[in-house]
Image (tube, coloured by chain):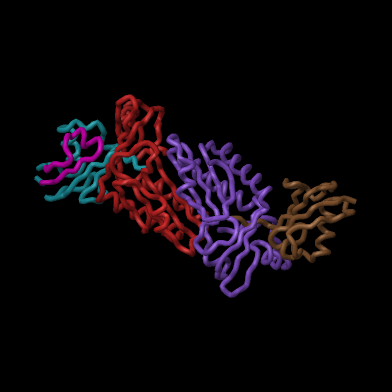
Chain colours: A cyan, B red, C purple, D brown
């Protein structure tokens, strides 16, 4: 089990109903964590449309999770 | 004045351009992305921008550094607004100073294209009809549900 | 505020950009050609610009109209300085407002390239060493005297 | 013979030592007029490096001259 911090932005923030949360997870990697949270919060975007950042750097979905990691799921960007 | 930053108040292009003043720069190109009154056929009333700022600042700085490296320009700066914006307001500003104009145009275009594709910034459009939506999210999700209409991540939105 | 004009005093990019404000324009690109401290290896102190104004105004207006027609942009403006300019001053400003950015970049580049090739404006450089010369004239004349170095009319000068 | 008005700019103005003049010419066309004046004023630029305007529009060198025409020889331009 790892204890990780999530931050949510944009459509994911609205669907999660919160900007951040801390969770205990048994997921093996970032992908597994996303599937857990997508089920809990009812995210409309699939993982194939998102990227993930761990500790404020882009990461692979296969990234294993460590206690204290800060995870952000990144919806399709739309700057400009 | 090089680099990438956010602004919570109105962007002042003249002040930003002055920050890139350089007597060895014969060419200066700037881009302003402004809030339009229409997007994909819907009448827009205002926009909200938000960003994952810690990562966005790093990725924005990488893009500007790439442009300096690739095009040999003398200076470049990009500022993006956050928060609520009305029609006609400047949402993003890019300025490039260079010895000659060809590299200034190429680098300015590179920076805005990469920022739109890579930097974690999101835009919620509020429409005249009272509806609202996150650009590239809700409607792309609908499109993705139709066979043959899958959109990739970071699908360019085209301002 | 569309079109081509001359200015005998300093160019104010912010005021000119405001003249192209348009809530249907999501992209605005501008180019500033500034007086550099160096040209072709010589240290420049100041420049004098002069124009055959009657023809220049017609040819400049044609170029802006061509850009609107070719690129479907919403508005474009070019202002060129005349008289004596010091280092860092804006010699020419081009602004283009468009629905989307690709056409704004293309049209801005088109206008400055065509203005430099077609509009009867001349530039005399004054060098730190006290010498001076008409750009594209004296030195091209020397080059033309060397076999294999003939330069065509309107030889681009590359700021 | 035609009586035409010349305006000079940039290097040609300096070499002619004047900004304008009126001349009577027997030249058949703009090209012939240029050669007359180049000989008189010692212009350094050859006709192949210039363009000509008649009455504030670009014209061909073969343009015949009429009384009252305003002629400008245009050195290589250098705006921007």
| Quadrant location of the C terminus of chain B in the rendered image | top left
Residue C35 drawn at (x, y percent)? 53, 61
Q: Residue furthest bottom?
A: C129
- Residue B110 falls within the magenta-colored stretch: no
Vertical comparison of B82 with B135: above or below: below
Q: Nearer the viewer, residue B146 or B16?
A: B16
Residue B141 drawn at (x, y percent)? 31, 30
Residue C55 drawn at (x, y percent)? 68, 48
- Residue drawn 40% across the image and 30% down it: B40
Vertical comparison of C127 with D28: above or below: below
- Residue drawn 54% across the image and 44% down it: C77
D35 sits to left or right of A71: right
Residue D53 drawn at (x, y percent)? 74, 49
| Quadrant location of the N terminus of chain B in the rendered image | bottom left
C126 sits to left or right of A23: right
Magenta stretch in the rendered image: A3-22
Q: Nearer the viewer, residue B106 or A39?
A: B106
């Amino acid at each position: 089990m790892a204890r990780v911090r999530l931050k949510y932005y944009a459509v994911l923030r609205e669907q999660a109903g919160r900007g951040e949360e801390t969770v205990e997870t048994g997921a093996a990697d970032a992908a597994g964590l996303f599937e857990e949270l997508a089920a809990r919060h009812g995210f409309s975007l699939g993982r194939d449309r998102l990227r993930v950042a761990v500790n404020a750097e882009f990461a692979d979905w296969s990234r294993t999770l460590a206690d204290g990691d800060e995870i952000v799921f990144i919806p399709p960007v739309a700057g400009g | 004045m090089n680099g990438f930053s956010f602004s919570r108040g109105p962007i002042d292009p003249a002040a930003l351009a002055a920050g890139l003043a350089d007597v060895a720069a014969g060419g200066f190109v700037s881009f302003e992305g402004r809030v339009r009154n229409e997007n994909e056929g819907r009448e827009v009333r205002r926009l909200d921008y938000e960003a994952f700022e810690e990562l966005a600042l790093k990725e924005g700085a990488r893009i500007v550094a790439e442009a300096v490296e690739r095009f040999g320009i003398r200076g470049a700066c990009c500022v993006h607004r956050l928060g609520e914006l009305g029609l006609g307001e400047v949402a993003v500003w890019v300025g490039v100073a260079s010895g000659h104009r060809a590299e200034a145009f190429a680098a300015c275009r590179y920076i805005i294209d990469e920022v739109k594709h890579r930097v974690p910034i999101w835009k919620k459009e509020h429409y005249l009809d009272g509806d609202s939506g996150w650009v590239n999210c809700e409607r792309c999700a609908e499109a993705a549900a139709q066979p043959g209409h899958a959109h990739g991540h970071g699908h360019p939105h085209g301002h």
